Amino acid sequence: MILERYRPLIAGALGKAARLDGALSVLVGYPLGLTEADGSPGPGPSGKFLRPSLVLFACEAMGGEVEKALPLAVALELVHNFSLVHDDIQDRDEFRRGRPAAWKVFGEGQAINAGDALLVLALRIALSAELPDSARLSAQETLLSATLRMIEGQALDLAAEGKALGVEGYLSLARRKTGALLGCAFVLGAIAAGRPDLREPSQTLGEELGLAFQIRDDILGIWGDPAKTGKPVGSDLLRKKRSFPISFALGRDPGLSSLLSEPERNGEEILRRLAQVGAKAAAEEELRRHLGEAERLSWELPWPEWARTEFQELLGFLAQREA
């Protein structure tokens, strides 16, 4: 599958890219899993590597050389990790990938420095890609624009806490927060393969995949198994997140809003009301809709048969993943 096909290559390149001296060495290495807080070796890079894998997949599927896309893939993974470090501070999440979050280990100020360094490192790595000048500049602009759009999505997400978004408002937010970087992944792959003419369908395909990924996250954030997600039951409820199931339910049961303001006290009643309006089923149907749209859009791209087969496997994984 795509996530396994490129993982060793990405992990090796990520380790080299994040090898820094001085005070930033541990601050950058810790959230990537490369070091422990004391500077000793960490458990190694973790996470799914979805975004960088899609960069390399898109490049190879369009006839490009994976090695030329690798710096762009690593840059995108570094941007993703920058966002996670800062998001954990903003959302007060104490754990990330089974370890204490960077802000819990180093304090908020140093975690901000860690996130900032990951972002700048990403931009520097992207500039090292061995591509024609015009392609390298286009890739850098693509990465910057997607990062800004992702940050906008996070800003909208924080502003939405405790408010009624509606399903369309939620999808607009998620298309930025999650869809932007997944869209960027496919575009970076196309640029590295010398196919900038496929930018638009690549972007749209990635955004649809991003919406599906986020909605599955939303389902797991309420009904996921804590042993697999690493988060408590109903974690999104406790954080008062306006996820897809909540946005859907509020449109059918406005009275739910008062219960959501005190999730610690009202958890069981909230879950009962969500079941009553069919929020989980609606989220699962929306997930299938975006996966179907991503599959449809993939046929607009000139992929060989092996790529179509692996993409189908990825869609199946995203529909059923439990963490």
Image: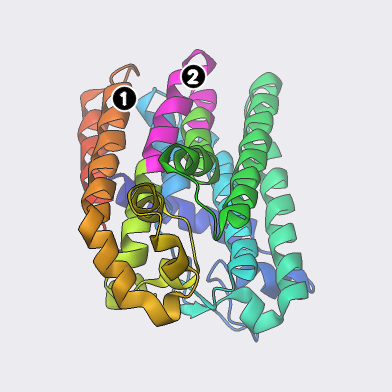
Task: Report whether 307 appears left or right of 157.
Answer: left
Numbered circle sitting on residue 123: none
The amino acid type of the residue labelled 2 equals Glu
Numbered circle sitting on residue 200: 2
Magenta-colored span = 188-211
- Say which of 63 and 299 sits in front: 299
Q: Residues within 10 Å of mark 2 (few under 14, many from 20)?
A: few
Res. 250 in view: yes
Res. 6 in view: no
In the structure shown, which secondary structural element does the residue marked by tag 2 occupy? helix
Cα distance in 3D space between marks 2 and 1: 12 Å
The amino acid type of the residue labelled 1 equals Ser
Task: Report whether 186 appears left or right of 162.
Answer: left
Residue at the (55%, 80%) spot, across then down: 41
Considering only vertical position in the picture, is 197 above or below 232?
Answer: above
Of labels 2 and 1, earlier in sequence is 2
